Amino acid sequence: MKFARWVFLIAGIYGVLALAPMYFQEAMVAQTRPPAITHAEYYYGFIGVALAWQVLFLQLSRDPQRHRPLMIPAILEKAGFGFAMLALYAQHRLSNLMLAAGVVDLLFVILFALAYRRTRNTMVPAG
């Protein structure tokens, strides 16, 4: 269970540190990685949803056993971004920096799956 606590704590902290500054970087992103952002609602919507997931990861780190069922959507969240980045990179539509972010998420897929597996044997039946 200690493994799961650390995995989700690290994922949550990493995510908050990576995502929160993006709220203040729209202009810089548009300038350094053209074209400019034409649909700000997607940009800020992504950040907001992704930050909400970081809160879930931090919650999971507090009591992985209790929140074990939430590990499955957590795995899917990380896989969705990671595999999308691989697909975009394969189509030459993605920078190396964003590919690296996708690979980090795919690493978390593996770690989350291991955390899920390691917590199964300690399940306490309800009642």
Image: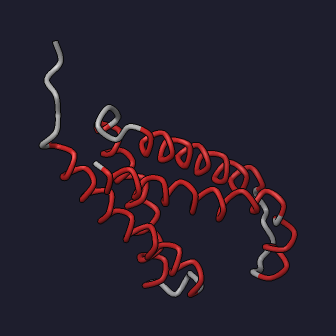
Q: Residue at x 35, y 39 (%)?
A: 70
The residue lying furthest to the top in this view is 127
Q: Residue at x 18, y 18 (%)?
A: 126
Viewer-side residue, 11 vs 106? 11
Residue 13, position as x, y percentages in the image: 58, 57
The quadrant where residue 20 appears? bottom right
Its colouring scheme is secondary structure
Residue 37, position as x, y percentages in the image: 78, 66
Determine whether 45 is above or below 113 in the image. above
The quadrant where residue 78 appears? bottom left
123 sits to left or right of 94: left
Determine whether 57 is above or below 97 in the image. above
Q: Residue at x 16, y 12 (%)?
A: 127
Disc tally is 0
Residue 38, position as x, y percentages in the image: 79, 62
The residue lying furthest to the front in this view is 2
Q: Residue at x 18, y 52 (%)?
A: 117
Residue 76, position as x, y percentages in the image: 36, 52
24 sits to left or right of 14: right
17 sits to left or right of 4: right
